[in-house]
Image (cartoon, grey):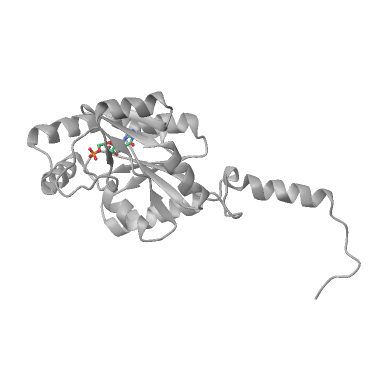
Amino acid sequence: MRIDGKREGLLIVLSGPSGCGKGTIVGEMLKRGDCAVSVSATTRDPRPGEVNDVNYHFLKKEQFTQLIAQDRLLEYAQYCDNYYGTLRDEVDALRAEGKHVILEIEVQGAMQIKERCPEAVLVYTLPPSVGELYRRLKKRGTETDEVIEKRIRRAGEELPLADRYDFILFNDVLEDAVADFSSIIRTAYMYPVYHKNQIGEMIEDAKTFHVPDHIEE
Ligand code: 5GP
């Protein structure tokens, strides 16, 4: 789906252990102007400072179940006792505008996207070490030690799936991670699947092409 002949934007999945800095990287990518994030639905409670419909669409479990029943989620998963899901309409509208849509989601959801949207680019973010991951989570100060431990344990369980992704993005120095992410976008935009329309138009043009009488200078 395209609007005004614009090229459809990329669908980019960004996963990685909780606290490894995905949110900060995405914040930097949004400054480019051609990237957008899709606001997910979740059943978890807002953290201090989080705003409904900006950080997440915060929903009751029944509302979330209704979205599933209506097939309005591109993917969804349960993560540490809560549900999280991506709204299909939101993603489609942004991509049609030509925006590269970044889905900051965990691995189960990422694998659903890989299955349903073969053109998606899957990026897995890695922190320098588990110790550094703990320090970052502790510094964020939004989770109790018990939750931090649960999230780090979960990260260890997820890591074997990292090799199902297309790219690994190291987040040691933020500027380097942002530059690498930009390179990934640039490379992925060369995937043939993102140029089907242009290639199709050229095929049609080539069929009816005739050598012109004179060549314009
Ligand atoms: P948090 O509670 O820290 O905001 O998010 C917990 C985990 O859920 C993170 O790994 C985050 O990337 C993931 N997540 C956020 N939104 C979605 C979503 O729409 N779908 C899936 N599958 N995971 C999500």
With 200 as the anchor, is 40 left or right in this view? left
Depth order, front residue of 189/71: 71
Quarter of the image for the C terminus: give it.
Answer: bottom right
Location of ligand 1 given as a quarter of the image: top left
Residue 79 in percent (x, y) is at 25, 29
Residue 62 on image: x %, y %: 28, 25
Please state which of residues 126 and 108 is positioned toward the viewer in this rendering. 108
Q: Is residue 56 above or below residue 206?
A: above
Residue 186 can be seen, yes or no: yes
Tell me: residue 180, above or below residue 127: below
| Residue 168, picture quadrant | top left
Residue lying farthest to the right in this orientation: 213
Q: What residue is shown at x 31% (from left), y 37% (from top)?
A: 41
Between residues 118 and 187, which one lies in front from this camera angle? 118
Residue plotted at (34% across, 33% down)? 85
Taking the view exactly as shown, the residue that stands out farthest to the left is: 145
Q: As displayed, is residue 157 above or below residue 100?
A: above
Q: Position of residue 113 (x, y in %)?
A: 44, 33
Q: Residue at x 51, y 53 (%)?
A: 98
The quarter of the rendered structure image containing the N terminus is: top right
Point out residue 213 in the picture as x, y percentages from the top left corner.
91, 67
**Count of marks overlaid on the render:** 0
Q: Which residue is more in the foreground, 182 or 96?
A: 96
- Tell me what residue is drawn at x 26 percent, y 34 percent: 59
